[in-house]
């Protein structure tokens, strides 16, 4: 009985949300059909749905998706390796940490993605420009969260390690790093989300690469249903990426 | 006769003029400058790509002080550096985006935070749409609002809306129940509840949401300016790229980062002020 009421408590709002969304789409479709919304500005939702097949078949969406994923993977690997290493180095040297931590936090708030024209000059109009701008923009949260995780290790754990006469290297690998891993992953996840946002954004801006370029190309061809469908696809990919990384984070931090 | 003794303790060591942290910071900055200058002088990378610090400094001075734009104000013509005009355009767009996106986000956040049913029905969509790259909506914004500042404001608004609404909704849920009960016992109406109870109790999450929102609104607006505009700081950056004027690009980026970091620090200070 209580399980049923719990399902009802969760299910009714969920169905209501979906229903509202469907009603909104139907209203937009109706307003376009009766001419209250210009179809040359907002395409009919049915046209958008129909164009999904076209962009999947004709616009090579799978290779583009794989290219964006490859760029995201390269940037994520780079920022995990460099970001975690820099975080560990800063944690080891208190003076360097005190001198640079506020700088890194300040850099994290700067719109680094605006440096993409500079990266275009250095790396050319290639995937490296996209990967490097994603890497640079997403690096600060990984460093800061690694530092936070290592500094937040409970003193009692470190004391236990010392009582076992662990070497500094063993202390790091057996105590500090495992204890900091959940927080480090929060940083890596944030970094990966920033990286994906910047990758699709720069692909769109420089008209090169995967999904971002697809949106730009379709918009330049004035293929409105295709543009909207491509945007929906980008949203879908972002949501799946977000849910996937969230699941891993929950697995690493079961208490949260 | 009482004898006054004198202190015989060892004198305190004079504090160094600069703390070790400050000295290290100066050393790091100097090292970066020396490495940069060495690369610029060596020609390992193109001199145009890595210009000398002096050249960048000159470009920065020209950007900030060279009056290269004529403006008319109160029937008088003035010449000012064009940078300030472009900065004014960008700040206006970001401010408009922050006002529209912030107000809408706050209103929706309050509604979602106050009503668990609405929160369960709609919050997941906002939560998932939050981290999507908003710049891909720019073609849509151009179709809806045109190629002028309106589409840039719309981009900033869209970017800013999500962090504000999510912060406001979670802030609303964190308000202590006793405060809400006090408000109800005084029979406050909805507006009084919002202005006297909800908003004062959730200042910190709101300021944090605005801080996040301001950062992403700035990014959204500037990226839109680099894509399609003839004014604003984003336009200045892409214009420097198109004319291959690298020192000017470095100067504009430098000023942009200083302004963005300064604005973020100011809002951060306001956030800390709400806690004290």
Image (cartoon, coloured by chain):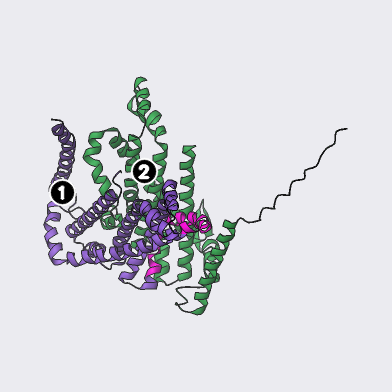
Rendering quarter of residue A78: bottom left
B65 magenta-colored: no
Residue assigned mark 2: B102
Q: Quadrant of the N terminus of chain A?
A: top left
Q: Is residue B40 above or below residue B146?
A: below
Label 1, residues with CA under 10 Å away: few <14, some 14-19, many ≥20: some
Q: Which chain is purple?
A: A
Q: In the image, residue A75 lies at what x, y percent?
A: 32, 64
Question: Which residue is labeled 1 in the image?
Answer: A32
Element carrying mark 1: helix
Above or below: residue B190 compared with residue A70: above
Where B116 falls versus A27 (above or below)?
A: above
In the image, which residues are magenta? Answer: A90-119
Whole-percent x and y of residue B97? 37, 48
Which tint was used for chain B?
Answer: green
Position of residue B102 in the picture relative to residue B274 (left or right): left
Report whether residue B37 is seen: yes
Q: Is residue A115 magenta?
A: yes
Q: Quadrant of the C terminus of chain A?
A: top left
Instruction: Left or right? Give the position of B60 relative to B5.
Output: left
């Amino acid at each position: 009985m209580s399980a049923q009421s719990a399902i009802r408590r969760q299910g009714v709002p969920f169905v209501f949300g979906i229903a509202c969304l469907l009603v909104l789409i139907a209203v937009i479709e109706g307003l376009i059909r009766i001419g209250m919304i210009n179809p040359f500005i907002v395409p009919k939702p049915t046209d958008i749905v129909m164009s999904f097949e076209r962009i999947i078949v004709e616009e090579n969406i799978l290779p583009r998706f794989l290219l964006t994923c490859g760029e995201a993977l390269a940037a994520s690997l780079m920022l995990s390796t460099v970001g975690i290493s820099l975080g560990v180095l800063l944690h080891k040297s208190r003076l360097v940490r005190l001198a640079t931590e506020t700088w890194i936090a300040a850099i994290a708030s700067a719109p680094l993605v605006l440096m993409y024209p500079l990266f275009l000059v250095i790396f050319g109009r290639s995937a490296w420009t996209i990967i490097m701008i994603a890497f640079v923009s997403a690096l600060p949260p990984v460093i800061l969260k690694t530092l936070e995780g290592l500094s937040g290790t409970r003193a009692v754990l470190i004391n236990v390690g010392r009582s076992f006469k662990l070497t500094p290297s063993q202390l790091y690998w057996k105590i500090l790093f495992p204890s900091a891993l959940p927080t480090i992953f929060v940083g890596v996840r944030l970094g990966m989300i920033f990286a994906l946002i910047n990758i699709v954004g720069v692909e769109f801006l420089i008209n090169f690469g995967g999904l971002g370029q697809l949106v730009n190309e379709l918009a330049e061809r004035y293929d409105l249903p295709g543009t909207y469908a491509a945007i929906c696809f980008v949203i879908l990919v972002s949501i799946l990426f977000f849910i996937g990384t969230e699941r891993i984070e929950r697995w690493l931090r079961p208490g949260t | 006769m009482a004898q006054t003794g004198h202190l015989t303790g060892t004198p305190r060591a004079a504090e160094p003029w600069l703390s070790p942290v400050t000295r290290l910071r100066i050393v790091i900055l100097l090292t970066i400058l020396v490495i940069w200058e060495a690369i610029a002088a060596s020609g390992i990378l193109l001199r145009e790509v890595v210009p000398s610090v002096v050249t960048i400094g000159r470009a920065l001075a020209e950007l900030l002080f060279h009056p290269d734009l004529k403006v008319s104000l109160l029937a008088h013509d003035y010449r000012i550096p064009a940078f300030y005009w472009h900065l004014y355009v960008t700040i206006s767009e970001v401010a408009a985006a922050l006002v529209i996106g912030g107000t809408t986000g706050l209103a929706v956040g309050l509604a979602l935070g106050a009503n668990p049913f609405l929160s369960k029905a709609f919050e997941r969509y906002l939560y998932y749409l939050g981290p999507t790259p908003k710049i891909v909506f720019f073609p849509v914004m151009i179709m809806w609002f045109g190629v002028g500042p309106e589409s840039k404001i719309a981009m900033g608004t869209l970017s800013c809306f999500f962090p504000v609404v999510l912060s406001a909704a979670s802030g609303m849920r964190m308000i202590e129940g006793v405060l809400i009960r006090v408000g109800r016992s005084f029979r406050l109406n909805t507006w009084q509840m919002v202005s006297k109870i909800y908003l004062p109790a959730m200042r910190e999450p709101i300021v944090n949401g605005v801080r996040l929102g301001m950062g992403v609104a700035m990014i959204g607006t500037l990226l839109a300016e680099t894509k399609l505009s003839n004014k604003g700081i984003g336009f200045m950056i892409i214009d420097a790229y198109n004319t291959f004027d690298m020192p000017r690009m470095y100067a504009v980026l430098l000023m942009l980062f200083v302004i963005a970091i300064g604005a973020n620090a100011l809002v951060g200070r306001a956030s800390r002020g709400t806690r004290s």
